[in-house]
Image (cartoon, rainbow, N blue to C red):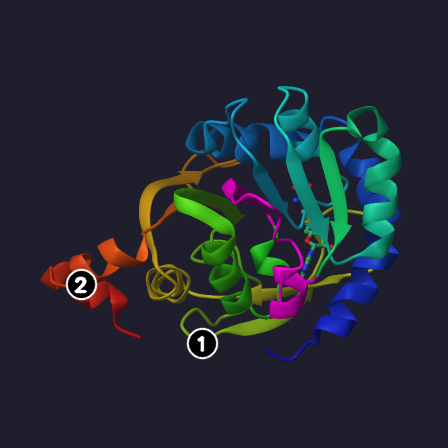
Amino acid sequence: MHHSVEESKAIWNENAEFWDNAMGDESNDFHRQVVRPKVTKLLNPQPTDYILDIACGNGNYSAYLAAQNIPVVAFDYSEKMIELAKKRQVQYADRIKFCVADATNPASLLSLKRERPYTKAVSNMAIMDMTDIRPLFTAVYELLADNGIFVFATQHPCFVTRTEKYMTPHSYYDIAIEGQPRKQCYYHRSLQDIFNLCFQTGFAIDGFYEECYKTNPEIPMVIIVRIRKVPQNNKLNLCKNPLHELQFQS
Ligand SMILES: C[S@@+](CC[C@H](N)C(=O)[O-])C[C@H]1O[C@@H](n2cnc3c(N)ncnc32)[C@H](O)[C@@H]1O
């Protein structure tokens, strides 16, 4: 991966105002059509939940949860994005705690630990923007309650990439939305790299969708994955099952 966290963060700080305007209060059409419905189906948010919104952008999905009386801790590494999110979502200030934290930095992630564990974590269209996702999955395992879930939506690595390479992880510049001030850094990972990381960090996949946009109903642009924290004791037992032994191999 060629592009550094510092570089990608500087770009997101520059793009923050554009992104906030483009997403507005309700997010954009792509998000509403392709991302939100299945993320919400897999997340199944309930008023008893305590949810971590990872790389929250302007907080549009946090607001959707807060509107259902669900308490949320939402973070992003872009200070500008968090400043704009706090302003935009001021009506939910009692339910959403916005923080600046870097999902590639273990210490920064552990600063998100609160007096009670999160029941659920969610990340919309962001892991493909992260230089390194191992710290995030490792930390989310620690931050979640036993059997807690993490739902993430990201670009479909088989169909959405701007390079010829599939197997080898790599980064490249591209835009998310026409007109954004600067191209952002994308980080490609194959499906097996993403899924094996989930298994290695103690999760089992128990929900999965591939979603298309209206422009092509046969080519999915997004994957939506639900992973469930397997408690340590069960993890040991699961490893006796040959299928799971395979999954936990590094
Ligand atoms: C495509 S936007 C998605 C924002 C939001 N989840 C949404 O759906 O509107 C990606 C977000 O990931 C954030 N991001 C990228 N790398 C990050 C990191 N290492 N730690 C925290 N946030 C990060 C960016 O600042 C940006 O807000």
Q: Amino acid at mark 2?
A: Cys
Q: Which residues are magenta?
A: 102-125
Whether residues under marks 2 and 1 lie with C-beta atoms below 8 angstroms apart, the answer is: no
Residue that appears at 39% across and 65% down? 197
The extreme front residue here reads 115
The answer to whether mark 1 is within 8 Å of ligand 1 is: no
Residue at image position (71%, 29%) is 95
Tell me where residue 25 appears, x and y as whole percent.
77, 27
Q: Percent from the top left, x then y, of residue 79? A: 84, 55
In the image, taking residue 171 as reference, residue 199 lies left or right, namely left
Q: Is residue 192 above or below residue 122?
A: below
Q: Residue at x 42, y 43 (%)?
A: 148
Circle 1 packing at 10 Å, graded few (<14), some (14-19), many (20+), is few
Q: Nearer the viewer, residue 232 or 57?
A: 232
Mark 2 Cβ and ligand 1 under 8 Å apart: no
Pick whichever, 233 or 240, lies toward us. Answer: 233
Q: Which residue is mark 2?
A: 239
Up-down: is 90 above or below 1? above
Q: Residue furthest top?
A: 68
**Vertical relation: 73 (above or below) 69:** below
Image point 66% across, 29% down: which residue? Answer: 29
Lateral position of residue 99 relative to residue 69, left or right: right
Quick check: 233 above or below 62? below
What residue is shown with label 1?
168
The amino acid type of the residue labelled 1 equals Thr
Q: Position of residue 1 (x, y in %)?
A: 59, 78
Q: Position of residue 155 (x, y in %)?
A: 53, 51
> SS at mark 1?
loop
